[in-house]
Image (cartoon, rainbow, N blue to C red):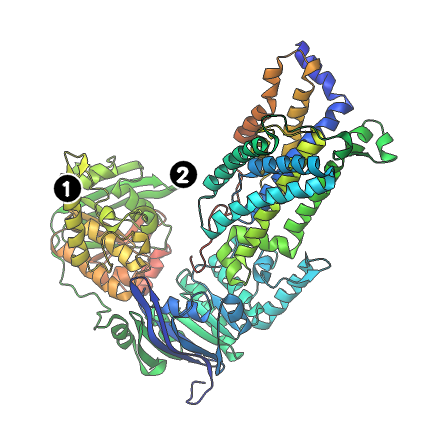
Amino acid sequence: MSDQGASLAVDMRGITKQFPGVRANDKVDFSVRRAEIHALVGENGAGKSTLMNILYGLVHPDSGEILIDEKTVHVAGPRDAIGLGIGMVHQHFMLIPVFSVGENIMLGREPVTGPGFYDRARARAAINELTRRYGLALDPDARMGDLPVGLQQRAEIVKVLYRGAEILILDEPTGVLTPQESKELFGVLRDLVKGGKTIIFISHKLKEVLEISDRITVMRRGKVVGHLTTRDTNEEEIATLMVGRAVLLRVDKAPAKPGEVALKVDNLTANSDQSVPALKGASFELRYGEILGIAGVEGNGQSELMEVLAGTRHATGGQVLLAGRDITTMDANTERDAGVAFIPEDRRGTGLVLGFSIAENSILGRERALTFSWRHFVLNLVAIRNWALRLVKEFDIRTPSIDVAVRNLSGGNQQKVIVAREIGSNPKVLLAAQPTRGVDIGAIEFIHRQIVRERDNGAAVLLVSAELDEVRSLSDRIAVMYEGRIVSIEPPDTPEERLGLLMTGGGVREGAA
Amino acid sequence: MSALGDILHLLLTANLWQATLAAAVLLLLPALGGTISERSGVVNIAMEGMMLTGAFFGVAADLAWQNPWLATGVAMLAGALMASIHAFVSIQFRADQIVSGIAINIFAAGLTVFLINRIYGLQDVGHVGQSALLPNINVPGLDQIPFFGKVLFQQNVIVYVALVLLVLTHLVLFRTRLGLRIRAVGEHPQAADTAGINVFAIRYGAVFTSGLLSGLSGAFLAIGISNTFVPNMTDGRGYIALAAMIFGKWTPFGAFVACLIFGLGQAIYDNNSIIHVSPYLLSMLPYLLTLIVLAGLVGRSTPPAADGLPYVPGSE
């Protein structure tokens, strides 16, 4: 299917696009053969999205030409792209939650009767026909907002197919999916390619790319740095091209030297946002100089545990001791003063004030510290600037200046701002919830190294992650959480299967904890 | 107690309900306009100003040409012109839509007073002759039905037009392709754009339509119900229409129900001569009802998701 001389579905030549302050695409050559799955990989900000937005007509290139089916075309807007048979499944779905599935799919090409009346029956028939042909079951009358994410994505794909797309662009399609949903998606993609469709798959998850693609184009900082054939490459090679240097995909760390007990959590209970018990008597000990990783299926009380420990959620019972001192009822501010740092899982919602600059975000929660304010009252702007400049340098935050609003940073750099702020305060205890979610590999490696360095400096680190790989590679001990309790403490080399079993409630006697 | 008795007595008269419907229609037209505008994602609180402008130009045109139909057309265009300013500022320049709306309301109040002085001097604007008013039409036959005949079929021509527009707006918004696109643009302009829909064109059209409807209401007020223009004669009706739109959860029929409630308050006040309560107290009734309804009865009503958010192409 990817033999030489196969005709090119997409051929972009010398595409250049300059945005204020950054050259997003620099003489990019990108070609995709017909009926292949072509992966476009690169870190956040490498220019993948810009390139695809150009192909889809959302962004106009400064120079370069685009050929579709070997004919030069001009893509002035999405309408042109749709006309050329290009369809895009966006990372953030272009779906309207209050509309039905059918209305969402038909939007822009609605069947009508009489004087412009929307023809629901014909819409339903068209969708049923499509879903039958491609084996993508969907209920056209369901309300879009009621569907799980996997089905919403399926609706996006059907929407694109309905518009007669021959070339499908999928932007980070697995970012929001569960592993099971991802598997289903891959099956769908393979079927589509068998049916003659061409797929461009944007991702930075290398395992997936290797699993699903035929060929790979790697971008870094606006340039294409590699054209690869999937079967002749491996994770290390792609990662090296993406980041521009050799990347350690495993965490390199010395054995832990655990010290005194830092946190003692005893029979802790708390409610979720819906006021139902989420944490149901969790108990464990965390020592200085070790990383305790909490493994578990999301929604088993991990978020609530971290928030109670950080002082942003009330415990309904139990006790938390920090070096022997009761901190159960302390608020977040007092806890910070006591040396507890917190990397929250929702960086855009609770970790950062998106409209604030890097400098302002870098002192959030510490704005009253005497270093940053005169008599806890008037901000010392010079000190804050110096502090922010230091963090930017030390934590390799990629930004034109510290006055940039964090909203305009990439996800990885936003996360680095939080990590820098929290680790930069020299905490005794570091609570890290999903510290690398949605961050690219270069930054992941960096954040991991920072966390290990904190441990080596004697801090106690509590890690919660939905990625089992991350928990296993980073932790010195693994606590498995299930239904609001710690059901088992395991060594880090515990096989994935055993952890998986524990995480779903198997393998332990009831009430053992 | 006797005041309550007076009101109860009033509620049984066809006259009151006839006046209620007319007062409701006066609010319904701008409320429909607001609904269309906000469904497309442009917050519109400028109905007051658009109405007032329409009322002034309606009277001015009618005085000049003695033709109520032509005058109504002029009033609608004047309203739409005001709406175009709002559209231009908030769609093209992505200005804050509340601020733009307030600016237009203040501008309209000032502009009309200024124009009165310019055109008519310090005198009265003058009165439109009986023959040049928008006519009342009695539907032959139907107007003889006891009670309902008077309420429904002895009304100003604009009342019938408004009821047709009510049904039409509902059908367009919820049954047609155009309506689907308007609502898509108001919920998720990015999704609409990527589906090949022209977001700007839809929003311009929707705001322009809201101006036409508000202008029509202004004409109804000035050369249908009354026969002259006095400064600030809309008296907050544009804002009450806004409340009706919210109360109606951005649906035409919902807004109509709200307009009927407010219209009833207005009609009761207009009959204050037979109620033994201070007319000043009664005059508060429509506004009081607005407050009570908005605070208590509606509960949360969710506006279109992208209401008030300017669209920047290519953004997420």
Q: Residues within 10 Å of mark 1 (few under 14, many from 20)?
A: some
Nearest to the observer: residue A213 or residue B155: B155
The N terminus of chain B is located in which quarter? top right
Q: Residue at x 55, y 70 (%)?
A: A161
The C terminus of chain B is located in which quarter? bottom left
Q: Give the secondary structure at mark 1.
A: loop
Q: Mark 1 points at which residue?
A: A323
Q: Which residue is drawn at 15% across and 45% down?
A: A382
Q: Give the secondary structure at mark 2.
A: loop
Quadrant housing residue A226: bottom left
User: Where residue A307 appears, x then y in whole percent?
Assistant: 29, 44
Name the residue type under label 2.
Ser
Q: Residues within 10 Å of mark 2 (few under 14, many from 20)?
A: few
User: Where residue A136 appears, x then y in whole percent?
Assistant: 55, 67
Q: Which residue is drawn at 24% across and 53% down?
A: A417
- Subunit under mark 1: A
Q: Name the residue under label 2.
A: A275
Q: Is residue B93 left or right of residue A84?
A: left
Q: Residue B238, can we see it?
A: yes
